Image (spheres, rainbow, N blue to C red):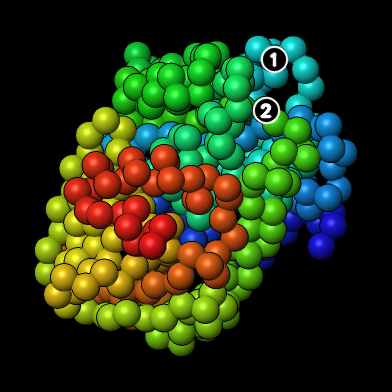
């Protein structure tokens, strides 16, 4: 694949496959489909491989930041365009392409609407090939570059909760401010941030991860029920761990994150937006950035952590991290350490054993 004009079938596959690769986070399926359809209605967005761009071309990351389960969250496609405009004005240089921060139901198609409106291409080099909870995890280790200044534009909310802001500063502080703004805006904001060269994105992002999402979605949508779940596992080299009724489910939204746990057939999953750990009888079966995901056991619809309910019949799948297309942050010990405090589980000893 070099330059491809995105189609409706590609969009649907990207959203469903992205939802699987979201690992419990990455936005809602319905929102992703709505955004994707709107993008294709207003224009003809194109997907380029990272190799199509010149090394020095600036690419901007577009993202959703906040808690998907927040009841007052309000974002619209034009918010994405506004954030991109604010970012370009702040840096005083033209953006040549758009990348998403991660794969997810909503996030895989991040940038498609902006591309349709502006004519800029979507570049298949997301910051990460699966969804992740923190802004730093979607920043390609830029926080480790001495003297790097992060520029971030955030837009979201409705009426008196509407916010549009530009933040410049050290990456950690800028990301923290955007997270606080998401809370003030009702729980979620759209963000355009951290312009980097195409060369840097190729070296530190996840080139080819959007195509992987499309292929996973095609596998899922090409079958039904258990066969669809099996097709996804075959495509990713994963397995169905168990299927059964949700016996326990706890969720708290705090500080712009969804945090909680799910128990199915004695298998406990913790989540921090995305599923972080999978255990049974004290044995660790999966640890972020492994892909742990829930799907409706009968329809194979991917179910993100925020929409799980007691009594649902869900299947749990697990895919080793080695089978995913991951960005450099997923190998960053410092960033992985933040997961331990969020879910109160050992993480580092399993990732870096």
Query: Whole-percent x and y of residue 75?
Result: 45, 32
State the residue at coordinates (30%, 72%).
Answer: 285
User: In the figure, is residue 245 to the left or right of 329?
Assistant: left
- Residue 10 occupies which quadrant of the picture? bottom right
User: In the figure, is residue 56 to the left or right of 27?
Assistant: right
Distance in Å between CA atoms under marks 2 and 1: 9 Å
Per the image, label 2 sits on a secondary structure element best described as: strand
State the residue at coordinates (43%, 19%).
Answer: 173
Marks 2,1: beta carbons within 8 A = yes
Specify the quadrant that holds the N terminus.
Answer: bottom right
Query: Whole-percent x and y of residue 70?
Result: 28, 37
State the residue at coordinates (16%, 70%).
Answer: 282
Number of labelled discs?
A: 2
Query: Whole-percent x and y of residue 63?
Result: 53, 37
Q: Which residue is mark 2?
A: 195
Nearer to us in this view, 196 or 35: 196
Q: Which residue is mark 1?
A: 91
In primary-sequence order, the first of circles 2 and 1 is 1
User: In the figure, is residue 84 to the left or right of 17?
Assistant: right
Q: Is residue 168 above or below residue 324?
A: above
Per the image, label 1 sits on a secondary structure element best described as: helix
Query: Whole-percent x and y of residue 322?
Result: 53, 67
> Dot 1, crowdedness within 10 Å: few (<14), some or many (≥20)?
some
- Residue 43 occupies which quadrant of the picture? top right
Nearer to us in this view, 282 or 103: 282
Q: Which mark is residue 253?
A: none
Nearer to us in this view, 318 or 320: 320
Specify the quadrant that holds the C terminus.
Answer: bottom left
């Amino acid at each position: 694949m070099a330059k491809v004009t995105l189609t409706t079938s590609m969009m649907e596959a990207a959203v469903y496959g992205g939802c699987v690769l979201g690992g419990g986070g990455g936005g809602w399926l319905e929102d992703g489909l709505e955004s994707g359809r709107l993008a294709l209605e207003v224009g003809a967005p194109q997907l380029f491989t990272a190799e199509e761009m010149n090394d020095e071309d600036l690419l901007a990351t577009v993202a959703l930041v906040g808690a998907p389960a927040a009841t007052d969250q309000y974002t619209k496609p034009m918010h994405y365009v506004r954030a991109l405009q604010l970012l370009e004005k702040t840096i005083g240089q033209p953006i040549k392409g758009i990348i998403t921060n991660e794969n997810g139901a909503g996030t895989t198609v991040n940038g498609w609407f902006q591309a349709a409106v502006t004519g800029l291409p979507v570049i298949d080099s997301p910051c990460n090939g699966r969804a992740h909870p923190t802004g730093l995890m979607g920043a390609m280790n830029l926080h480790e570059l001495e003297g790097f200044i992060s520029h971030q534009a955030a837009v979201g909310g409705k009426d008196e909760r509407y916010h549009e802001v530009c933040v410049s500063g050290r990456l950690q502080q800028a990301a923290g401010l955007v997270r606080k703004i998401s809370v003030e805006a009702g729980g979620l904001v759209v963000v355009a941030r951290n312009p980097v060269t195409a060369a840097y994105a190729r070296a530190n992002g996840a080139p080819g991860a959007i195509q992987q999402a499309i292929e996973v979605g095609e596998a899922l949508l090409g079958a039904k029920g258990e066969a669809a779940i099996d097709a996804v596992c075959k495509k990713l080299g994963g397995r169905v761990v168990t299927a059964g009724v949700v016996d326990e489910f706890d969720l708290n939204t705090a500080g712009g994150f969804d945090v909680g746990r799910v128990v199915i057939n004695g298998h406990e999953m913790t989540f921090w937006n995305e599923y972080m750990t999978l255990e049974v009888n004290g044995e660790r079966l999966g640890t972020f950035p492994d892909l742990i995901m829930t799907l409706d056991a009968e329809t194979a619809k991917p179910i993100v952590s925020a929409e799980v309910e007691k009594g649902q019949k869900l299947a749990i799948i697990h895919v080793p991290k080695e089978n995913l297309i991951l960005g450099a942050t997923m190998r960053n010990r410092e960033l992985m350490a933040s997961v331990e405090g969020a879910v109160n589980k050992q993480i580092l000893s399993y990732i870096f054993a």
